Amino acid sequence: MSWGTELWDQFDNLEKHTQWGIDILEKYIKFVKERTEIELSYAKQLRNLSKKYQPKKNSKEEEEYKYTSCKAFISTLNEMNDYAGQHEVISENMASQIIVDLARYVQELKQERKSNFHDGRKAQQHIETCWKQLESSKRRFERDCKEADRAQQYFEKMDADINVTKADVEKARQQAQIRHQMAEDSKADYSSILQKFNHEQHEYYHTHIPNIFQKIQEMEERRIVRIGESMKTYAEVDRQVIPIIGKCLDGIVKAAESIDQKNDSQLVIEAYKSGFEPPGDIEFEDYTQPMKRTVSDNSLSNSRGEGKPDLKFGGKSKGKLWPFIKKNKSPKQQKEPLSHRFNEFMTSKPKIHCFRSLKRGTQSFCFHKELMKRTIGKPTYAFEARDYVLSLKLGATPEDFSNLPPEQRRKKLQQKVDELNKEIQKEMDQRDAITKMKDVYLKNPQMGDPASLDHKLAEVSQNIEKLRLETQKFEAWLAEVEGRLPARSEQARRQSGLYDSQNPPTVNNCAQDRESSPDGSYTEEQSQESEVKVLATDFDDEFDDEEPLAAIGTCKALYTFEGQNEGTISVVEGETLYVIEEDKGDGWTRIRRNEDEEGYVPTSYVEVCLDKNAKDS
C-alpha cells in the first residue's frame, strides 16, 4: 500500500491532506498550551486559598491553632499547597516535553513538506515541458505532411498540363521533393521526441512521483506517530504526579486521624483555668428567727473582734462567698446562674466613685501591697485571689501578671521566661560573632580596626546582663507561682495568718450588709466599696507599726547596679551596705542603705559577709 502507486494522480488532494495534518498538530499544541494555563491558574488559586486561611503571625488567631483540630486544618492547608505545586509541575512538564518539542517538530514538518511538494511540482513542470515539445513536433510534422501533399498535387497538376513549360514543371517537381524531405525530417523529429516523452512520462509516473509521494506518506505517518507519542506523554505527565498527590491526600487523612478531642479539651482547661477553687455551699438563712442586722459600714470593722469562725479566703469552708457573687434575698425574683453573675462581673465597668471612702485612696492600697511584698517576700495565694478580683475592677496590668489567675499567670510567666531566654541566646550569638570578627581583625589589621568593635561588644554584653536580670526576676515570680521558693519566715507566716483570720469576717460582713438593706436586696456598689475599704484598713493595721528587719551582716558592691525595676535598689561599686536577707536561691540578696532605702540586688554583684550569729542560726 503506497501513495505513489495508489494515489499517483492525487497530487493536489495530498497537498491539502498534509496541510490539514499540520493544522491538526498545531491545534493539539494549542490544546496542551491552554491546559498548562489552566493548571497554572488552578495552582495559583489553590495557593491563594491556602494562604488566605493560614493564621496571621503574632495574632490571636495564631494562638487558637494550638488545638489538634486546628493543627490538622493547618496540615491540610500545607498539603493543599504541595498539591498546588504538583499542578505546577504538570504545567511545566507539559510545556517542556510536549509544547516545545511539538512546536519545533511542526517547523521541521513544514520544511519537509515544502521540499517534497516542491520536488513534485518540479517533476510536473518537466513532464509538462516534454508534452509541449511533443505537441509542437507533432503539429510541425502534420503541417509538413500537408505541405508535401499539396506540393505533390501541384506537381502532378503542372506535369499533366501541356501548356506549362518544362521549366515550370521541373520547378514544381523540385518543390514537391523539398516538401517531402521536410515532412520526413519532421517525422523523424516527432518520433524522437515522442520516444523521449514516453520515457519521461514513464519515469514520472513510475519513479519520480512514487518516490515523492512515498516521502510525503512517510512524513505524514511520522506526524501521526508523533502526535500519538505526545498524547502518551500527556498522560504520563499526569501519571507521574499521582503518587505525590496521593501522599498529599494521605497527609490530609493522617492529619485528620491525629485529631484528639481529649487533648483539645485539656488545652481548653489549660487556656482558661484560673486556679481558684469553686465557692462552697451557701449557708441556710432562717428568716423565722430574729436576726441582728447591721446597716452601717462600722459593722465591717467591728466584726473582727467578734467570736466568729475563721473562714479562709481560698479554703473549702461552706460559708465562703466569692466577692463577685450577687445574692438576692427576694423570693419573688428567680436566681440567676453563677456563670451569668461571673460574666456580668467580668464585663462590668469599674466604678471608681465607690473607692472614695478609702482611708488614703488607691495609692495607699498599692503602697501597702508593695510593702507587704517586700516584707513577706511574695504575695500568698489568698492575696493573689484578692488582687485578681481587685485588678479586674481597676483594670491594672502589672509586670508580674498578678492580675491573672494563678494558672494563667504561670503560663504567662513561663512564656515570658522563654522569650527572654531566646533573646539572651540571640545576643550571645551576636557577641560570639563580634568576638570572632575582632579576632580576625587582630590577626589581619588591614581588614579592620579591632578597637571599633569594643563599643558594640560592651553594648551587647550589657544587653545580655540586663536580659539575665530580667530573666531572674521573672523566674523568681514563676518559682513563686509553682511553689518552688523557700518557706517564708515565721513573722511572714504570722502576718499572713493575721490577714487570713481577718479577711473572712469581712466577706461575711458583706453578706450581713446585704441582709441589712431595707428591701432585702444587695447593690453591687455598696459591696465593692465595703470590700475595698476593709482591705485598705487591714493593710494599714498590719503594716503601719511593722518593725524593720535586723541586719544579719554587711556586703560590699563589686559592680555598679542600676535598680530600675520595682523592689530593687541601686548601688555603686565599692559601696558598703547592710544585709537584711540573704539569697534564698533565686539569685537576689536583700540589703539596706539606711532606714528608708532598702531593696534587692543580684547576689553576683555584691560580696556578702554575714555575722557569726547569723551564720550559726
Image (cartoon, helix red, strand yellow):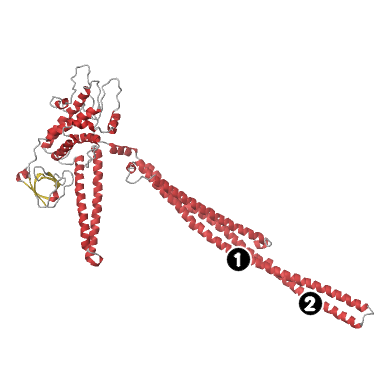
Residue 247 seen anywhere in this rendered image of the structure: no
Q: Residues within 10 Å of mark 1 (few under 14, many from 20)?
A: some
Q: Which residue is mark 2?
A: 185
Residue ID at (18%, 30%): 357
Q: Distance between the Cα atoms at labels 2 and 1?
A: 41 Å
Q: Pinpoint residue 373: horizontal percent, then vertical percent.
A: 16, 39
Identify residue type, mark 2: Asp
Under circle 2, the secondary element is helix
Where is residue 387, by image quadrant? Answer: top left
On screen, residue 438 above or below 178: above
Q: Which residue is mark 1?
A: 115
Front-most of 320 and 297?
297
Front-most of 575 and 415?
575
Residue ID at (77%, 71%): 138
Quadrant location of the N terminus in the rendered image: bottom right
Quadrant location of the C terminus in the rendered image: top left
User: Which disc number belongs to residue 103?
Assistant: none
